[in-house]
Amino acid sequence: MDLKQALQRAWQIVQLDRAAIREVAADPNAMLPGLVLMALSGAIAALLSLNPFGILLGPVIAVVGAFVGTAVLHVLALLFGGRGSYGALFNAGAHGHALLSAANVVPVLGSLVALVWGVVVSVVNLEEVHGLSRGRAVIVVLIPVLLTLACAAVLFSVIVAAFLHAFHHT
């Protein structure tokens, strides 16, 4: 599969084309193009942020993030009765999410769109790759999202408390 074909498949996945999701998930040659798309999305994000260090680290962070994120979803999917493989979930996820990251070009709104639609794409990927029901797929996707939000809320509360404490004593 060449880069043009990978982009076409990624676009189909973002459009929730279930046949494309199953095709990419089952394709043993889809991992390398998925990795390339993830690395490109990381490099593009770094270029757009004008971060010179990010140009080198962006692709690495995007690829490692894809591997870790897929691992979390895969383990949760298995706990909820999923029957798919890690590689199949990675293939479908890397293609779709690499393309979705392009929405981050538009500050704030683009990130919000990418986040929300990324949840939808992940749910459909889990339905197709792991054979989960819609409800179970939603739960699998929302667990890491809610845990991340809870951690962010705790961190924010600690920062605010530290700031208020320091302000109160000056």
Image (cartoon, grey):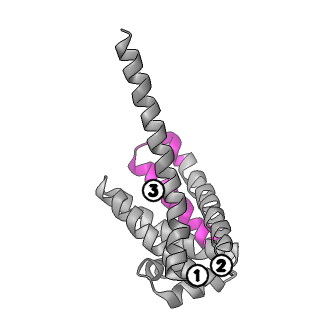
Mark 3 lies on a secondary structure that is helix
Query: Residue at the spot x=63%, y=72% of the render?
Result: 77
Q: Amino acid at mark 2?
A: Gly
Query: Residue at the spot x=65%, y=78% of the render?
Result: 82
Query: Closer to the N terminus: mark 3 or mark 2?
Result: 3
Q: Quadrant of the N terminus?
A: bottom right
**Residue 6 is at least partly visible in this image:** no
Labels 2 and 1 touching (C-beta < 8 A): yes
Cα separation, mark 3 vs mark 2, equals 34 Å
Q: Amino acid at mark 3?
A: Ile
- The residues colored magenta run 32-55
- The residue that label 3 is drawn on is 44
Question: Which percent across, then down, holds residue 33?
Answer: 60, 73
- The residue that label 1 is drawn on is 132
Query: Closer to the N terminus: mark 2 or mark 1?
Result: 2
Cα separation, mark 3 vs mark 1, equals 33 Å
- The residue that label 2 is drawn on is 82
Quadrant in which residue 63 is drawn:
bottom right
